[in-house]
Image (cartoon, rainbow, N blue to C red):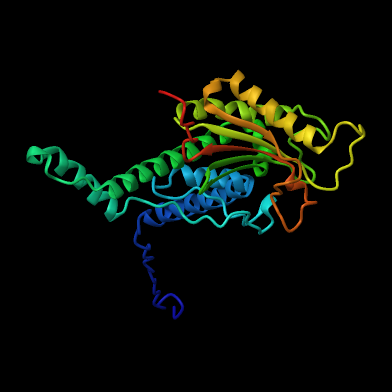
Amino acid sequence: MAESDAQIIIKRIKKHRPEHHGGAWKIAYADFVTAMMAFFLLLWLISMTTPQQKIGLADYFAPPNESPTLSGAGGIMAGKSPSDSGAQKGASSSNISAAGSLDAAKHAPNGNAKLDTKGSSLDESAEKDMGFHSAAVSIKQAWHALPQLTDVADNLLVEETPEGLNIQLVEQSGQRMFPEGSKYPLEATRQAIAAIAPILQQLPNQITISGHTAAGVKYNNPRYGAWDLSSDRANVVRDILTEFGLSDDHIYSVVGRATQDPFFPDDPYLAANERVKITVMRAAPPIPADLKP
């Protein structure tokens, strides 16, 4: 009987379920993963582009007053710079005053206002500088649009100098622009020359073309040397330019300089001294006194 009288106690345990916190963390995590994927994709794209392509992209998004001058920080230049030219000059206060002087001269009664000819010349110089800058950017973009020029991108140089806009097709060890001893360019070189012909045709300036060779090169034919090769290469470049749209009246001179004007005067034996230079002349050539317009 004692056992049947025992009190039975039943414990009921209530389980509390955790409150639902929502899926906000999932959205944040997805955003983080997406950002990391985009970051690594950007790193991969940067590692796949050449230095010349990076310069082209920078020039494409650069403001119009930025200079496209190459400083020779790497690649074929090997840290050297053949030019001491400075950055591109933008519009200055003197140019603004020149524009004001021109406007004042137009509206002055009886023509008494004096025209600031010095300011006018500065304004024209600034316009020419902007035209050279636009041409340099257009040339780089034309080259970057041709995937077949990727391997020779470091051989193609564009630089603004006091004498004008220099476009150079430069040899380097392991990557030539012309077969050794030949006046005819490789196909990639030919396409690079053809791409700039329409751009040069749109400019009012005349151009000079000069061929150059490196010192110490031996020629198999004793009657055909550095002067002959440099002259022939310059003339072949002229022929390609005219074939693709450059008129003859844009060409001022075609010369061969042999080893007389090395790219690196301190080391005339470097392969980079062998090149063809196309110069868009900044100043118009002098007109003979006896020549009537």
Q: Is residue 186 left or right of residue 108?
A: right
**Does residue 246 appear in this view?**
no
User: x and y percent of residue 70 in the render?
Assistant: 56, 51
Q: Is residue 162 left or right of residue 168?
A: left
Q: Is residue 161 left or right of residue 236?
A: left
- Name the residue located 48 percent from the left edge and 35 percent from the top edge: 286
User: x and y percent of residue 208 in the render?
Assistant: 59, 34
* Outermost residue to the left: 109
- Name the residue located 50 percent from the left edge and 26 percent from the top edge: 201
Whether 214 is drawn above or below 243: the answer is below
User: x and y percent of residue 150 in the render?
Assistant: 66, 37
Figure quadrant of the N terminus: bottom left
- Name the residue located 43 percent from the left edge and 50 percent from the top edge: 66
**Does residue 289 appear in this view?**
yes
* Outermost residue to the bottom: 2
Q: Nearer the viewer, residue 251 or 115?
A: 115
- Name the residue located 28 percent from the left edge and 49 percent from the top edge: 119
Q: Nearer the viewer, residue 253 or 292?
A: 292
